[in-house]
Amino acid sequence: MKKEDKNKIVEQIATTIKEYDNFYLTDISTLNAEKTSILRRECHKEDIKLMVVKNTLLRKAFDSLDESFDELDSLLVGHTALMFSNVANAPAKLIDKYKKDKVPALKGAYVQESFFVGAEYLPQLVTIKSKDEVIGDIIGLLQSPAKNVISALKSGGTIIHGVLQTLSEK
């Protein structure tokens, strides 16, 4: 491969890393063409971008970025495929779905500006909430007291005595 071609690939990998908030390093070397195609379709359904890369080119892409990805250098052995997603736990859920087949095998991940090195972090990565899920939980918690007050007011009817009695019981 020509040096210009390698530089273009390194640039493409670096651009993709910047574009997504989270990425997972996996090993899909034991998949045949048919199973790889199925995995790619499932990734597409979940808005996950799957990219098979050479370790040396990925290392050069990491070096070209402003952030340091040195913690992931030890994972750049064997076959490596990257799973990019803006939803923190989407790739982890997909990997977990296939954990009995052990393919794709999790090597590590960069999720929400944190490094996870090793497959033992998969259960934690599956349960990480996305930004939208956290916002939804916060909104639900904020709405809860207002809902309680409204239901208390409704239960007492429109009579002031009923309202005061309901509030004093709470």
Image (cartoon, rainbow, N blue to C red):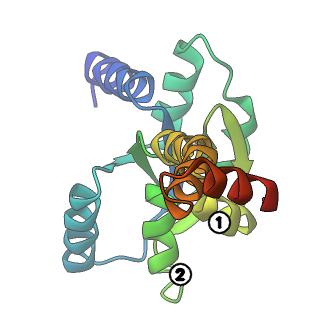
Q: Does dot 2 land on a helix, a strand or a loop? A: loop
Crowding at mark 2 (Cα within 10 Å: few <14, some 14-19, many 20+): some
- In this picture, is 162 found above or below 99? above
Q: Which residue is mark 1?
A: 122
- In this picture, is 115 found above or below 29? above
Left or right: residue 41 versus residue 110 is left
Contact (CB < 8 A) between labels 1 and 2?
Answer: yes
The quadrant of the image that shows the N terminus is top left
Q: Position of residue 122 (x, y in %)?
A: 65, 66
Q: Which residue is mark 2?
A: 99
Looking at this view, name the residue that lies furthest to the bottom: 100
Q: Amino acid at mark 1?
A: Leu
In depth, the one of 7 and 50 nearer the eye is 50
Look at 29% across and 60% down and name the residue there: 43
Left or right: residue 35 versus residue 69 is left
Q: Position of residue 52 (x, y in %)?
A: 36, 50
Q: Does dot 1 land on a helix, a strand or a loop? A: helix
Left or right: residue 20 versus residue 45 is right
The quadrant of the image that shows the C terminus is bottom right
Look at 43% across and 22% down and name the residue there: 18
